[in-house]
Amino acid sequence: MVYDAIVIGAGAAGLFYAATAGQRGRRVAVIDHSAEAGRKILISGGGRANFTNLRVSAANFLSSNPHFAKSALARFTPADFLRLMAAHRIRYHEKTLGQLFCDRSARELLDLLLAECSKGNVEMLLDTRVSAVSRDTAFHLETTRGPLRSAALVIATGGLSIPKLGATGFGYDVARQFGLKVIPPFPALVPLTLTPGWPELSGLSTAVRASCGKQQFEEKLLFTHRGLSGPAILQISSYWKPGEALKLDLLPGTDCAAIPPQEARKVLAQRLPQRLAEAWLEIEGFTQPLPSMKKLDARLHGWTVTPSGTEGFAKAEVTGGGVDTADLSSKTMEAKRVAGLFFIGEVVDVTGWLGGYNFQWAWSSAYAAAQA
């Protein structure tokens, strides 16, 4: 079979590329080794798909080139995707910090993408594996459905996160095959682990300001059986490197130095979960009588914790690193030295914050490639 473009990967980026290119009159096929399209979409956002964010900018993404995402993000914005949501009459709501979720279910978002693909006469080749890719004047794919040929090949295979849903390193292998550099992938937006011996605090949650280097996030922290999670930790985990310490402000915006010493334990138990307040004093070695309130205040706002590691790709929401942006056009996502080869979405070294940013990168990068 011969196509104008073959997309490998039936996730958010792959489906949106296929729909957009198909509606521009291109003959497009989507290949995925899974029997079902969009499996990761269905579990995203607690099953309601945090499909974009109202506050998107390039500053909300990690990349070896912090400017790379600007072009694609400017050409297809959250407002553009909201128009598509309106056309499909999908209701949504804002939670916090500009995060937009479907009112009912992530299934509505997947149905939107599949309907748009159908509108573009996209051919869906699911439960299909690719065993080899080669190129002469076109791209040739050996698959379990037989040989396929196309003028353009779009890699939208995602990263290594959540392998139980079928994540593989296939996209990185294709990039290396054609001479593109791959920034070593790492788990991002992932819970962090602590060394054994910590007090049992699992289930406790509190608002903190988590810092690593110059980056900081003020959101909730959640203690787990193995360490730390919650939005503040997932956010900062993308910036954390093994061996580094995190700085946690347990009472952001509170001047504890003004608390009378005799009231300190009572006030801490009121402003933090009581079990956490007691455990924190024990961990820090604060016994009766408590040290000067100035010292206590400094430690509360600058508690340092050194994680032992992360929960790995199995629990990571996304994958950091990926195909080096230095080898791609920021306007079209095409490989600079391989005409017709495109990389979009999570497989690229562009990793968004928690809160709908990675979906927006999927839409924007796919749109940029589809216009080419």
Image (tube, rainbow, N blue to C red):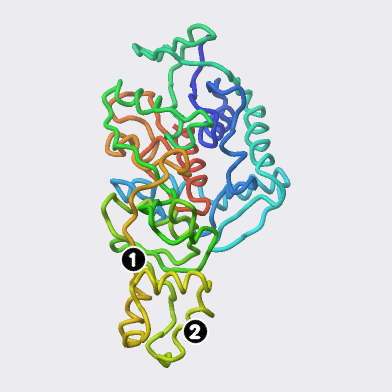
Marking on residue 258: none
Find numbered disc 1 in the image and state the secondary structure of the residue it sits on: strand
* Mark nearer the N terminus (2 vs 1): 1
Q: Tell us which disc is closer to us: 2 or 1.
A: 2
Q: Which residue is mark 1?
A: 247
Question: Which of the two residues, 228 or 184, is positioned nearer the viewer here?
Answer: 228
* Residue 346 appearing in the image: yes
Which residue is found at the position 29% from the left and 60% from the top?
245
Q: Position of residue 241 (x, y in %)?
A: 29, 50
Which residue is found at the position 50% from the left and 57% from the top?
230
Which residue is found at the position 41% from the left and 55% from the top?
60
* Residue 31 appearing in the image: no
Q: Quadrant of the C terminus?
A: top left
Marking on residue 267: 2
Mark 2 is surrounded, within 10 Å at the Cα level, by few (under 14), some (14 to 19) or many (20 or more) other residues, namely: some
Q: Is residue 58 above or below residue 296?
A: above
Which residue is found at the position 54% from the left and 33% from the top?
11
The kind of residue on which mark 2 rests is Val
Q: Position of residue 341 (x, y in %)?
A: 38, 25
Q: CA distance from mark 2 to mark 1?
A: 22 Å
The kind of residue on which mark 1 rests is Lys
Mark 1 is surrounded, within 10 Å at the Cα level, by few (under 14), some (14 to 19) or many (20 or more) other residues, namely: many
Q: Position of residue 314 (x, y in %)?
A: 46, 38
Q: Image check: 111 left or right of 188?
A: right
On the image, which quarter does residue 286 sit in? bottom left
Q: Image check: 257 left or right of 363?
A: left
Q: Position of residue 126 (x, y in %)?
A: 58, 20
